[in-house]
Image: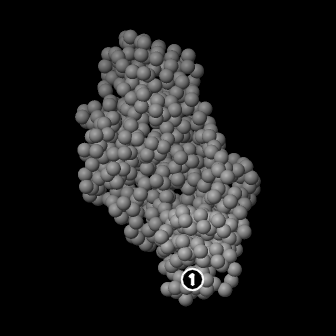
Amino acid sequence: MSDIETLRRIFATTRVIAVVGLSAEWHRPSYFAAKYMQEHGYTIVPVNPRYDEILGERCYPSLADIPVKVDMVDVFRRTADVLPIARQAIDIGAKVLWQQLGVVNDEADRLAREHGLDSVMDRCVKIEHARLFGGLNWAGVDTKVISAKRPRWLPY
Amino acid sequence: MAEHRYGIETLCLHAGQIPDAVTGARAVPIYQTTSFVFDSADHAASLFNLQTFGNVYSRLSNPTVAVLEERVAALEGGRAAVASASGMAAEAMALMTILQGGDHVVAAGALYGGSVTMFAVNLRKFGIETTFVDATKPDEFAAAIGPRTRAVFVESLGNPSLVVADLRALADVAHAHGLPLIVDNTVPSPFLCNPCAFGADIVVHSATKYLGGHGTTLAGIVVESGKFPWDNGKFPGMTEPSAGYHGVRWYETFGDFGFTMRCRMETLRVYGAALSPTSAWQILQGIETLPLRMERHCASALAVAKFLRDDPRVSFVSYPGLPDHPQHELMKRQMRGASGLLAFGVKGGEQAGVRFIEGARFMSHLVNIGDTRTLISHPASTTHRQLDAAQLAAAGVTPEMIRMSVGLEHIDDILWDIDQALAKSQR
């Protein structure tokens, strides 16, 4: 599920995000999202066989090659390519499978849930973070956040 | 767990604003500042590259204006919004974001006079042609669409024609041709009608009218539904690298609010019709009571319409809330009420109409609508005087027509003033 409380919990407990299909080109959406998450305190682990390093972090050819513990696998790949990535995410012990905006593999979603992972589809990790922790509201987007409490925003 | 769905009354008070992070202020703070500091050179670069969200300069975005934008987006059931200095600026921004020289628009003829002029004169200067068709005939819209058509434009409830557009039918026509339906929803306000629910892709408002409600402040807003497929091949400016914003691909990068980002970062940034924070705050004060006001506007306008219908000094009454209005049933399907605007003819022609206007005690002769006060005007000699006879007919304006925006005074007083002004009109 992608309700506000679930997403808040995901962002609060995630530290390391493996970004599958991350591009090194600054104007690509994957670079936008990963740079944003890096600036907001998350460790980014790029996964792309075409590069050695992106955003100052070592780039790995696949999820299985990553030597550190990964909390979230963020997928910038075509829907048809997601299923094997979901299997690898389960194998390396990730807690969240996140399919980006426009990526909607229902089978991967089901598989991840069956193995106890949180699963999000067709959402941008950057946009959802900015929606719930501040920033997206400044762009005039309906965040759907209704509250009489001060925001748990990050100072930036 | 499914999210709770809030009613529009609650959204009018809460959407877009939570207590201030630093001070705990409950009401919306006015951030009356032109500019915002960067934390570092890298932070500045990220902001300019749109890699992080934040404020740079109030021509692009401002935290007070952003509350208004998010609130109206929520009220319309849209994804995102961008505010502007006036309703005309909102309409221009929506159109200029997706149109270029050589493009074509199919628009309802029964539009606000300023909108007719924008299409027929001003956009035409830039090589954008418009075909005007009957707002009640979706077939005419379909027939007028050509290979360079890029938008379909209507008013949900025409001002001052009071024609109700069949939004679902028009959205179907537009979408069958891969085009967005742009709807000016000023007269109903988001409380009475939500065009996106019937398939509209972009909604524009003059927030000066019912949204503000107090007649003190100019403002406009453009709302995006978030559902239009901008990658259908007709809108390369949404999918190809932006020449105006160093190579960003709006639709790919921002998805269902890509149009709003492009409208903000290309059109608003360059043409500069930004809304002032204080004006945004004033409109927000009005929105808090929008549901209460609209209910009263509707009830009083219906009472006025019935009074005029039964008066022998009146030649005709047009109000979508009356059963004899041609789109009364459509109005009931599409709107929660018929709004506060009506039109009628005073027997005796143009001069009788002028005598009525000049004989009113507290009904104000001016060219606004949606004020708390009752307003009256004579379109043929004011808002629509630039139009020729054919355009007047297309806009539904006759020489003796009085446009009335029924206010929140006591209904007995409104009917009294109408009665005594009608008496003067017949002398």
Display colour scheme: one colour
Q: Position of residue B113 (x, y in %)?
A: 35, 39
Q: Nearer the viewer, residue B254 or B370?
A: B254
Quadrant of residue B127 within the rendered picture: bottom left
Task: Tell me which residue sits at (51%, 81%) in the image.
Answer: A24
Q: Position of residue B12 (x, y in %)?
A: 61, 42
Q: Quadrant of the C terminus of chain B?
A: top left
Question: Dot 1 surroundings within 10 Å: few (below 14), some, or many (20 or more)?
Answer: some
Task: Tell me which residue sits at (68%, 83%) in the image.
Answer: A68
Figure check: A117 above or below B267? below
Secondary structure beneath label 1: loop
Q: Is residue A150 visible?
A: yes
Q: Is residue B36 visible?
A: no
Figure check: B129 above or below B323? below
Figure check: B338 above or below B104? above
Name, please, the residue furthest toward the bottom.
Answer: A52
Q: Nearer the viewer, residue B136 or B33?
A: B136
Label 1 amino acid?
Ser
Task: Tell me which residue sits at (50%, 58%) in the image.
Answer: B257
Count of numbered tags:
1
Task: Tell me which residue sits at (49%, 62%) in the image.
Answer: B255
Q: Which residue is mark 1?
A: A62
Q: Position of residue B322 (x, y in %)?
A: 44, 22
Q: Position of residue B17 (x, y in %)?
A: 65, 51
